[in-house]
Amino acid sequence: MSKINGTGYVILGLLSVQSNLSGYDMRKGIEQSVGYFWGESYGQIYPTLKALTAQKLIKPAEAKRAGRKRQEYAITEAGRERLHAWLALPFHNDPPRNEFLLKLFFGAQAAPGVALEHVRDLQERNRRALETLDAIEASVPKDAPPNPNLPYWMLTLSLGRAFAVAALEWGESAMKMLAELEASGARTKRRPATKAK
C-alpha cells in the first residue's frame, strides 16, 4: 500500500463530501473549511492529485464550465476505503511550530514592550478569528436540509470558537502581567554578548 501524505487525505476527504472538484475548487474549499485549522501547501495539491490518480484512489472527470474544459476529479471506491481506514487510526498532533510562543518564551531577552506588543497583536488576530467563526455559524440556515456532514462541521467550528475565546481571556491576563512586569522593572537583565574565545 502506497503511503499518502496529509494533502492526500485532505483531497480524499473533500471529494468524499463533494464529487467532481477541480484542483482550484479544492484550493478554495480548503481556504473556506479545513484551512482554519489545517495548514496546507497549495503547491502540493496538483502533484498529489497526480499521485492519487496513479494509485486509482481518485479518477479524472473532465467537465465543461462556461465554455471551457477543466479537469475535475471524483473519489473511487478504493479511495473511499482508504479514507475510512485512515479516519479510524489514532490521530497524531505533532508539536506545532508556533513562532508567537517561541518569542514569548524568550521574551525576557527582548527589548522592553516587545512581548506586550506581540500579545496585543495576537489578541487582534484572535478577535478577527472569533468574528469569522461567529459569521460562519450565523450563515448556517437553521432550516437547512439535512446534511450528514453538518454536525461534524459544527463541532469543529465550536472547538475553534472555544480556543479563540480561551485565547482572548488568556491574552487579557497576559497583557496585564506583562504591563506590571514592565512597570516594576522586574525583567531579567540581558547579559552582554561575550566574544568567542
Image (cartoon, rainbow, N blue to C red):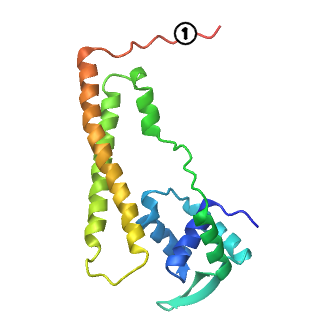
Q: Residue at x 46, y 63 (%)?
A: 34
**Rendered image quadrant of residue 171:** top left
Image quarter in which the C terminus is found = top right
Residue 67: image x %, image y %? 50, 92
Residue 74 screen position, x and y as percent: 59, 82
The answer to which quarter of the image holds residue 154 is bottom left
Q: Is residue 173 above or below residue 52?
A: above
95 relative to 67, above or below: above
Q: Nearer the viewer, residue 70 or 134?
A: 134
Question: Position of 67 compared to 124: left or right?
Answer: right
**1 or 102, nearer to the observer:** 1
Dot 1 corresponds to which residue?
194
Q: Which image quarter: residue 77? A: bottom right
Q: Residue at (44%, 32%) from the top-left corner? A: 103
Query: Relative to 54, is 188 on the left or the right?
Result: left
Q: Residue at x 33, y 84 (%)?
A: 145
Q: Position of residue 123 (x, y in %)?
A: 29, 43
Residue at 47%, 33% (x, y): give it: 102
**Which residue of the protein is positioned furthest toward the right in this rendering?**
1
> Up-down: is 99 above or below 92?
above
Kind of residue indicated by mark 1: Thr
Q: Is residue 54 left or right of residue 43?
A: right
Q: Number of numbered discs present? A: 1
Residue 35 relative to residue 135: left or right = right
Which quadrant does the N terminus fall into?
Answer: bottom right
Q: Residues within 10 Å of mark 1 (few under 14, many from 20)?
A: few
Q: What element does badge 1 sit on? A: loop
Residue 116 horizontal/vertical position (percent)? 30, 31
